[in-house]
Structures are given as C-alpha cells and as structure tokens.
Amino acid sequence: MLIHDISSRSNPRFKTFVRLLSGQGVRKSGLGFLSGPKQVKEVLKEFPERCEAILFTGADSLAVPEGIDGYRLSAELFRRIDVYGTKGPIVLVRFKPFLTWDSSEWPKGCTLFVPFQDPGNVGAVIRSAAAFGISRIVVLKEGAHPFHHKSLKVAGGAVFRIPIFAGPSIQDLGSELFTLITLSPEGMELEKFSFPETFGLLPGLEGSGIPQNLRQMPTLSIRMMRGVESLNAALATGIVMYMWMSKARNQSWEGFAQGKWRNTFSSDVRGTP
C-alpha cells in the first residue's frame, strides 16, 4: 500500500476529503466515506474493486488489498473527517453513476421507491432491502444520496448488494404501468394484505407522506399500540419488506424455493456499524 502523509489543512487532497462530507461533494466526485470497523473490513474483503483509498492516523494497521492507496492524516485532520469518532480507518469508496429507472421494465418481486431526505433513513432501507430480497431500489429526486456518509454508516456493504436506480420526483411518479403500494396510517392492515407477484412499494416523504395524486393506490398500514403517533419511515418500510418476504417464502416463490434465504439475523443484516 502506497502511503501519503497529510498534515496541512491546505493540502488539496485534504480539501477534497472535506468536500466529500456533503451530499453535493459526493454527487460531483462519485466518492463516499464509509466508516466503522466492521463496515470497513466487510467492504475491503468483499468489494475491494470499489475501494479507492484508506484514511487513517497514527500507526493504524489494516489488511489492505493491493492497489489501494493509504492516506495517513495528522490527528487533528483525521478528527475532521472522522465525524463519528470511530478513531479507526475510513475507506473511500467509488460508485458508478446510477442508471435511470425504466418504468417499462419490471423484475419479479418488489421494487422499492425511496423518497427519504434523511440519509440515515436511506441507508437503513437499503440495508433492509438487501436483507429481505428486494429486486431493486429506485431513489427518487427528493431522496438523499445513498453514498452520503450518513447513509453508508448504516448501509455498509449492502449498498453494493442490490441494484440502485435514479428515479423521478415523487410528484411525477405515475401508476399506469405497474401495481404501486403505498404506506399510510389509514391503509389496509398489513397482515391482511396479499402481495402481488410484481409490485412497487412507496413509503411517503418524512412528514408530508404520500402525494395527493397517489393516494388512490392500494395502501398498507401497520397496527400499533394506542398513543403512538407513527413509526420512523425507514422502520415502517422495513417491517413491510419483512412481511412481504415472509409471505413470499410461504408461497415458495422463485428464489425462496432455491434456498437463497437464510433464517438467521446475524450482525451483517441488522444495521450494526
């Protein structure tokens, strides 16, 4: 591993690293930071081709695949980048531009539309979608970038395990060519619903929910104890995806019947950083 030492705030490479802490910097560069010891080791081991560099400070040591550069930052500069205070190595990952979602093509199973503006929620549903066998993710224009550091902190390597597409605004999302299922407290109880073989799942925006023009679509709700106003958007979406997976497995759909699913919930599918 080739190591570059950086100790000055005026270093051009360090300035680039700082810009990557913003969503705009991620979009422009095609790069994002992933931190957390388990996440970093997972990505280096399973997706080394997506890793551009490792950032660290002091005498940190880590098994790094050939061809990945190392940047050893002074303690002060590393704290600026280590926004979660992990004190461990941070991996710089590269992503390819997302393909534009084609509304005429529908793979079997569930297509998840993600409008969430909170990158933490985006990361959470990506991790759940990968765990529960969702066919693909379509990030709507309102959605935070999946490679924002807050998203990657939750999603980890799951962001590379499921196809991600760029979609339209939630306001422009039509329903003519597919079955679209939305989530709302006023919807049908989730337990009573029979999922179609192919469908799109659309949770609402944080706060404003589902646009008026889509409220005539089939809508699901999650039963809760009285006095609780609502669930976190990403949590509610995860519950629906799990229920879909459970019902699909019981119906022996393709994929489940082939034994691709495991019955354990180990740390790599629970959002553990």
Image (spheres, helix red, strand yellow):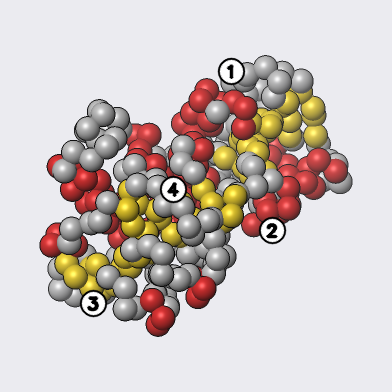
Q: In which quadrant will I find the N terminus?
A: top right
Q: Nearer the viewer, mark 4 or mark 3?
A: 4
Three-letter amino acid code at disc 1?
Answer: Ala
Three-letter amino acid code at disc 4?
Answer: Arg
| Left or right side of 200 for 68 | right
Which type of secondary structure does the marked residue at label 2 adopt?
Answer: helix
Q: Nearer the viewer, mark 4 or mark 2?
A: 4
Please tell me how crowded label 3 is: few (under 14), some (14-19), or many (20+) other residues with Cα within 10 Å.
few
Going from N to C along the chain, the mark reached first, 2 or 3, is 2
Regarding residue 92, the answer to whether it shows in the image is yes
| Left or right side of 49 for 258 | left
Which type of secondary structure does the marked residue at label 1 adopt?
Answer: loop
Of residue 200 and residue 23, the one placed in the foreground of this image is 200
Give coordinates of residue 168: x percent, y percent.
55, 65
Disc assigned to residue 186: 3
Q: Nearer the viewer, mark 1 or mark 3?
A: 3
Disc assigned to residue 77: none
Going from N to C along the chain, the mark reached first, 1 or 3, is 1
Above/below status of 243 relative to 270: below
Residue shown at the point (46%, 41%) measured from the top left = 162
Give coordinates of residue 220: x percent, y percent.
24, 67
| Left or right side of 109 for 87 | right
- Disc 4 to disc 1: CB gap under 8 Å: no
Furthest residue toward bottom? 212
Give coordinates of residue 23: x percent, y percent.
64, 57
Of residue 28 and residue 87, the one placed in the foreground of this image is 28
Disc assigned to residue 63: 1
Quote the CA–CA distance across marks 1 and 3: 51 Å
Quote the CA–CA distance across marks 4 and 1: 32 Å
Image quarter for residue 261?
top left
For mark 4, what is the residue?
136
